[in-house]
Image (cartoon, grey):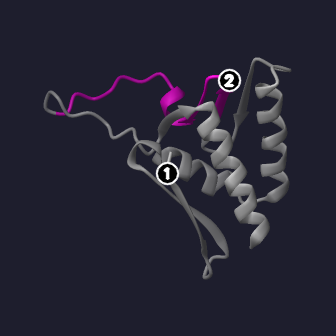
Amino acid sequence: MEFEFRKDFFSDQATVKLSMDHEAFATWLEQEGQSIPWVEALLVNISAVQKRVVTDFKLVGSEFSLLLNNDEAQVINHSLLNDFDEVDLEGDLSFYDLEIEASCGFDDFKNFIESWSEFLHSQ
């Protein structure tokens, strides 16, 4: 997973740029992960999953949930967790889900969060 971190000096927020398949991770992290203590607590839970102290981990945020196991990480917008019928938009068209759901391998996710932590500490 390729990523780039930036600091928005007008809003004083850190921002994330990710490849198209992983945009939901950027949205999730920008919304939830601006606090160093929050990121450090997440790293503790990532370590627990990696060491198999726990088999999986779920972190419910304001708009997204993170689901983590030893194989992969997934972020999913709460709107996708609701039961609703998808509207048929002229046959083959469907809702654009890349910004509200994404997954990646565990090691890629761990590297992403460790890099985010380093970036926040350097600001």
Magenta region, residue range: 66-89
Residue 87 appearing in the image? yes
Q: Is residue 7 above or below residue 53?
A: below
Q: Residue furthest bottom?
A: 10
Residue 73 part of the magenta segment: yes
State the SS at label 1: loop
Q: Residue at x 76, y 17 (%)?
A: 55
Q: Residue furthest left?
A: 90
User: Please, what is the three-letter code of the amino acid marked with disc 1?
Assistant: Glu
For disc 2, the marked residue is 69
* Quadrant location, the C terminus: bottom right
Q: Residues within 10 Å of mark 1 (few under 14, many from 20)?
A: few
User: Please, what is the three-letter code of the amino acid marked with disc 2?
Assistant: Asn
- Residue 41 is situated, as x and y percent measured from the top left of the image, at 84, 44
Q: Residues within 10 Å of mark 2 (few under 14, many from 20)?
A: some
Mark nearer the N terminus (2 vs 1): 1
State the SS at label 2: strand
For disc 1, the marked residue is 2
Q: Residue at x 67, y 76 (%)?
A: 12
